[in-house]
Amino acid sequence: VNDPCDQASFIERTQTLMSRGGFNLRGWVSNVACEFISKHSGDASGLGLLWNLDGDKLRCNIYLEVLSCETVISKRLILSLVQKIFDPIGILCAVTLPPKILLQDTWKLKVGWDIELPPDVSEKFFKWVNELYLLKEECLPRFMPFTEDSELHVFVDASRVTYSACVFVRTVLEAETSVSLIRAKTRVAPLKPLTIPRLELMACCIGARLVNSIRDALNLPNIKVTFWSDSEVALWWIREHGDWSVFVTNRVQEIRQLTQFQL
């Protein structure tokens, strides 16, 4: 809750609602004391994230795997370690992307799940694992200020190997402007080669999906949204009407529908 005065009513409403489904909510953690909860300190975990109650910040719970020089790097090992990083918000998507690209490269080699990978692939993966400890201190503020004038800004981009999108909320306060990352998502480009404009269009598509889910989750149907892309071709497809291919037409229609874009 944004206001400590709302804690008691929130707890009561939540317990009543969950009890209807047979769930008895008893454990609560708060960084502010109230009638039903005492103040806590340290870290609390939930949904794969660690919440530092003292600084009111979030960070991902990184699983650090110790690999020896004799460890056999295989497709199964790469996939296993990557999937152990649970990142629902997407704050680490740029970190989990390199091993996913490596994993896709191994499919091109057509090797089995437990076959040792070539030295160049193994070296890149070892380097990635050894740098994971740097993420232990990376965190984001939990609180994101929202006002009636808050705006969502969606940035999308693509390259030959990946395409991605991220959503920020921008709020102008009395003394300063606050900008916070809400969600991000990145994906490896398909094995079947696609042109850069098509990958840029796919980035626009996941950006539209992200912001649509955020508006629904936060109940902000009328919030101002600005989309940012450096692809003139993708923007042309979205803005104009033409006899595009099925690939382009389907994604343009989805983007227009999710963003309520009108020609």
Image (cartoon, helix red, strand yellow):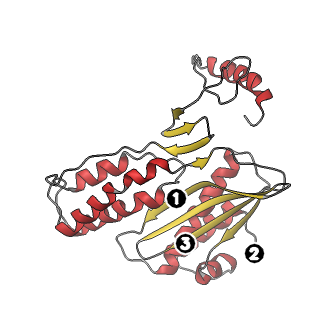
Kind of residue at badge 1? Lys
Give the residue pinned by disc 3: 157
Q: Nearer the viewer, residue 232 or 176?
A: 176
Q: Against 65, is 229 above or below? A: below
For the point 13% across and 53% down, the residue is 70
Residue receiving disc 1: 185
- Residue at the location (20% across, 56% down)? 74
Do tag 2 and tag 1 residues touch (Cβ < 8 Å)? no
**Marks 3 and 1: in contact by CB < 8 Å?**
no
SS for callout 3: strand
First in sequence: mark 3 vs mark 2: 3
Residue underneath mark 2: 263
Q: Is residue 224 left or right of residue 26?
A: right
Vertical relation: 167 (above or below) 144: below
Q: Nearer the viewer, mark 2 or mark 1?
A: 1
Which amino acid lies under the numbered mark 3 shown in the image of this protein?
Answer: Asp
Q: Residues within 10 Å of mark 3 (few under 14, many from 20)?
A: many
Q: Say which quadrant the N terminus sits in.
A: top right
Circle 2: residue type: Leu
Q: How many marks?
A: 3
> Is 123 above or below relative to 212?
below
Q: Looking at the image, can residue 243 be seen?
A: no
Residue closer to the observer: 218 or 173: 173
Select label 3 or label 2 by which is in front.
Answer: 3
